[in-house]
Amino acid sequence: MEAFYSIIYYRPNTLTDELLALGILASGGEGPFIHVSKRRLDLLKKILHPAQYTSIKRHLTFLKRSVNDDRSAPNELLLFDPTYSKERLE
């Protein structure tokens, strides 16, 4: 399996086209791995509406749960159709 990573971004302002990197999703021989920065989430909480922040937090929690479920799945099934492969994330 080929190793790769993808940075998780959020665009707080569409007019300025700025991106805020929130975390990283990586995959390799050991399976997928995700890390989301608590400091970046705290910054996002200060600049967004509470309902919008809650929605983003839910999506990230679901993504973390999905990655952890994928890590604990039997490896035999993931050899032929990995959930977090480079081709599927592109």
Image (tube, grey):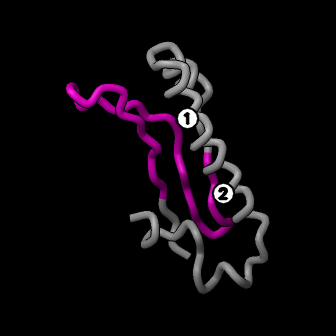
**Quadrant (top left/top right/bottom left/bottom right) for the N terminus:** bottom right
Residue 85's place in the image compared with 49, above or below, is: below
Percent from the top left, x then y, of residue 85?
52, 70
Furthest residue in direction left, as rendered: 15
Q: Which residue is label 2 attached to? A: 67
Residue drawn 57% across and 43% down? 59
- Residue closest to the eye, 57 or 76: 57
The kind of secondary structure element at disc 2 is helix
Q: Amino acid at mark 1?
A: Ser
User: Which quarter of the figure has residue 70?
Assistant: bottom right
Q: Which residue is label 1 attached to? A: 55
Residue drawn 67% across and 57% down? 66
Residue 78's place in the image compared with 3, above or below, is: below
Residue drawn 21% across and 25% down? 16
Percent from the top left, x then y, of residue 60?
59, 42
Q: Amino acid at mark 2?
A: Val
The kind of secondary structure element at disc 1 is helix
Answer with mark 2 or mark 1, whichever residue precedes in sequence: 1
Label 2 or label 1, whichever lies nearer to me, is 1
Q: Report how far apart the C-alphas of labels 2 and 1 lie in the structure.
A: 19 Å
Check contact, mark 2 vs mark 1: CB within 8 A.
no
Position of 79 with respect to 44 (left or right) is: right
* Range drawn in magenta: 5-34
Furthest residue in direction front, as rendered: 51
Q: Is residue 30 magenta?
A: yes
Q: Is residue 23 magenta?
A: yes
Q: Residues within 10 Å of mark 2 (few under 14, many from 20)?
A: many
